[in-house]
Amino acid sequence: MAAAAAMISLFIAGLFIARSAAAPSPYLSPTTLPQSYQNMLTTLRIFICTPYAPFDFPAAPASLFYNSLLRSPFVTQNPDEAHLFFVPFSPDTSTRSMGRVVRELRTDLPYWNRTLGADHFFVSPAGIDYSSDRNILELKKNSIQISVFPVVSGYFIPHKDITLPPPGGSPLELFHRAENSTRTSILGYLRWDGKTELNLVNELKSDSDFLVEEKPAQSESFTESKFCLFLYHGEVAGIVDAMASGCVPVVIVDRPIQDLPLMDVLRWSDMALVVAVRGAGRLKQILSEVSEEKIAEMREMAMAASKHLVWNEEPQAMDAFNMLMYQLWLRRHAVRYARR
């Protein structure tokens, strides 16, 4: 075990040494992240509360996260040594049944009442809304919610909740394509879902500097474009592939967003653009004003960051699953409320 931990530590250190020669770093805390991540690997313990009925998450990435957690070395059978408690329930559980789950946790186990659920977490792909039920209210306000990016407004609390990166393709293949791309043909590329922001999409289609595709068979357009456009609550599944391809992501949304994956870890503001425009002309102006030097810098950061957003059937060092566990680790210091 000690030898394995040492090898992992060297591997993690190597990732950051490799990045030290290429500034700037994609990480919010590049000096503290390696050691903190290593501490998480060796220390974090999670107790899984028994589900009241067998279930599974039908779609990735919630399914990948859930199944990886069940098999992970973070799980402990001793709740007294746990830093966090996982509350498993089916994504189609009704509000009434969800309240019953929390009520039984409160009654059957002593751990919920210590923090009113602040050291508990749950997976709800779409997120949950507020409720007048006390149990659901505590679950919503105190417990850590893990959802799929993006989350409906009002269903996500930034200081505690976490989003799962969407599934992507083959990063190594995309990195290779990126290295051999000149990116001179397309200013902005949009993979459209066929229904979101129709007026804007029609304007983009009429401008030769933009390319819009509804159901592309390949990802070449990512490597041929300077910017890849994503309509918030539209088709965002390709954002990881775009980043791995060296295409700078541009999220089009009419309000501030705080649910991007790994918000505690990555410097999203320096490797992606968030714009609130509703017209293709203004969008083109914004993108055209970004210097080639800045685009190159954002590309490098996005490519480096994308490695932490990749899902694997068997988790690997610092991939999406382990970085999600790291975000839980950062939230382990729950506020403990005084008894009344």
Image (spheres, helix red, strand yellow):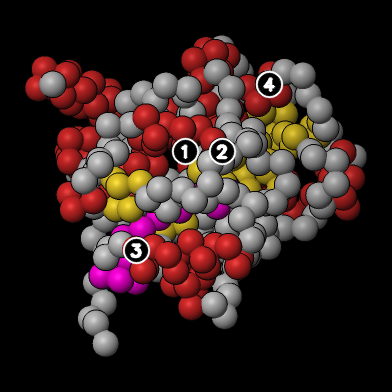
- The residue lying at 50 percent from left, 32 percent from top is 64
Q: CA distance from mark 2 to mark 1?
A: 8 Å
Using residue 259 as the reference point, say whether residue 115 is left or right of it. left
Q: Nearer the viewer, mark 2 or mark 4?
A: 2
Residue 137 in the image, given as x and y percentages of width and height: 49, 74
Residue at which label 3 appears: 108
User: Looking at the figure, which quarter contains the C terminus?
Assistant: bottom left
Do callouts 3 and 1 mark residues in contact (Cβ within 8 Å)? no
- The residue lying at 33 percent from left, 31 percent from top is 72
- Whether 126 is among the magenta residues is no
Residue at which label 1 appears: 66
**Amino acid on which the number 1 mark rests in the picture:** Tyr
- Whether 117 is among the magenta residues is yes
Q: Is residue 55 above or below residue 306?
A: below
Residue 56 marker: 2
Visible residue check, residue 71: yes
Q: Is residue 137 above or below residue 93?
A: below
Secondary structure of the residue carrying tag 1 is helix
Secondary structure of the residue carrying tag 3 is helix
- The residue lying at 59 percent from left, 34 percent from top is 60
Do callouts 2 and 1 mark residues in contact (Cβ within 8 Å)? yes
